[in-house]
Image (spheres, rainbow, N blue to C red):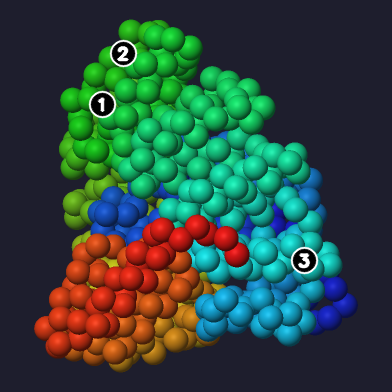
Amino acid sequence: MTRFRFLCLLSRSLCAESCLIRSLPCSQECFKEKFFTFNSTTNSHNLSTPLLNPYFIFHRSIHANLEQSQVLINNDDQNPEILTCKIIEDTEKICRLLSKNPTPGIQSLLDKASIEVSPALVLEVLKRLSNAGVLALSFFRWAEKQKGFVYSTESYNALIESLGKIKQFNMMWNLVSDMKRKKLLCKETFALISRRYARARKVKEAIDAFEKMEKFGLKIEPSDFNRLIDTLSKSRQVQSAQDVFDKMKKRRFEPDIKSYTILLEGWGQEKNLLKLDEVYREMKDDGFEPDVITYGILINAYCKAKKYDIAIELFNEMEAKKCPPNPHIFCTLINGLGSEKRLSEALEFFELSKARGFVPEAPTYNAIVGAYCWSMRMDDAYKIVDEMRKCGIGPNARTYDIILHHLIKAKKTTEAFSVFEKMSSKEGFEPTVSTYEIIIRMFCNMGRVDRAINIWDQMKAKGILPGMHMFSTLVNSLCHEDKLDMACKYFEEMLDVGIRPPAALFSNLKQALLDKGKKDTAVLLAKKIDKLRKTPFVV
């Protein structure tokens, strides 16, 4: 397997040299995780997400991610521009500036910041602002006026992704028109738009976005149909994906084994084993025999449904058919059995994977860490962390997120915070937004919102911006502690960065304000929400 190479140009400065030393292992590890972890990044890291669920799904969509991995490799080979220390420092500087000053006057502040714009910087900042569409667009409009700016498909797509998260669909299409004029459109752009519509439960619009590719001069091919049903399936619209599949199959689409595995995975995620079996039979009737990817999805589906004995039977079946399992399958079984506290069996599959010649990668080690954590054998979990460190492949942020989740679940909050501090101060890498979310939620649930705000401020100081779920956790906790002025402050900050609040969040805040006789404040916030929904998004 070709590894993703995170190229760094060595400058004469010691800063750049040390940056290379720190960044290369981290980026290689990121690629390992991307190759083994088949989930789109979620903004919500709770028990419903793969990050913290009972069986740690390491292959959200195997076929799709193999394509994405190949794109990463190809792009890296073609574009040697890298993230030097200067770019990383400027990115953090910009994000800190934007997070502290989400106002219309932000462009003048950026002018005074003496930032040297480059394509790599623009792309990195837009990725960091993925959860803040308003700020992303403000930055993009400022950057395009600067010397050194170059329009690219990647930067447009990153901006479209962030705008889609706050449901600014009209603005997204305006950007598509810009991309067409600049001849920067690609199919990935439409895939991003379809996904954002699907996640907003706008299935018809998601399908229309797919169909519009032809109007913009892009030919629709069989692989694009697979991408559409994959998009719908991953957005928890599996029945719609099935309907599209059935309709297209009759008219203009000849399915392949990938088409069927997409649906199998979707029904497996829904724990609908009846539909899973139905699609599996149809696949075989159409002449497709299960391959290692199909078996992986079936095994994952039965693990998700807690039917581990059937999952093991499928493992034995594929072995009998001379279809060798891959690391993803071993990870799935280790996670599933570990979550059921069938630790000895999980460890047997770990040893079997090594006996088959698979050198443990970060996801496999993380699976074992999780298995020990489920059985609350934390000392053994820490031993695996030490083993990862000695092997030079970790631990990584995901490893610590697993440990933190289980410590908090066991009410070992002091130990959890100690692990968090060690991670951020001694391990040489920063916690991710998901890690901060875990710790902030922990303090909020403990009734220590003051500690949560302290961690929040540390996170913001590092240029890491919160998403909707983090805002919701903090605002609800402040309401619960009757700190309504602060609750309103963070609620308005959420609106300022363009995040539309969940209805339940505003309902809680509004009721708390009304109970305290602050009707005028509730009305003012309601007007701001309405303005955010209706105002054309132009910066």
Q: Residue at x 20, y 32 (%)?
A: 272
| The image quarter in which residue 316 lies | top left
Query: Dividing the image into 4 quarters, which one contains the C terminus?
Result: bottom right
Whether residue 24 is situated above or below residue 461 in the rendered picture: above
Mark 2: which amino acid? Glu
Q: Which mark is residue 204?
A: none
Q: Quadrant of residue 233?
A: top left
Q: Is residue 178 left or right of residue 264?
A: right
Q: Nearer the viewer, residue 265 or 115?
A: 115
Query: What kind of residue is marked 3?
Result: Lys
Q: Is residue 267 left or right of residue 104?
A: left
User: Looking at the image, is mark 1 or mark 2 earlier in the sequence?
Assistant: 1
Name above or below for residue 521 compared with residue 1: below
Q: Say whether disc 1 or disc 3 marks the residue closer to the N-terminus.
A: 3
Amino acid carrying mark 1 in the image: Leu
Q: Which secondary structure, mark 2? A: helix
Q: Which residue is mark 3?
A: 145
Q: Which residue is mark 1?
A: 276
Q: CA distance from mark 1 to mark 3?
A: 52 Å
Residue 129 on image: x %, y %: 55, 66
User: What residue is at 64 percent from the left and 68 percent from the top?
Assistant: 139
The residue mark sitting in front, 1 or 3, is 3
Answer whether residue 88 is visible to the viewer in this image. Answer: yes
Q: CA distance from mark 1 to mark 2?
A: 10 Å
Q: Residue at x 34, y 17 (%)?
A: 246
State if disc 3 and disc 1 touch (CB < 8 Å). no
In the rendered structure, are the residues bearing label 3 and label 2 in contact, judged by CB atoms less than 8 Å apart? Answer: no
**What residue appears at the point 46 percent right and 31 percent down from the top-left corner?**
208
Q: Which mark is residue 282?
A: 2
**Residue 272, above or below 5:** above
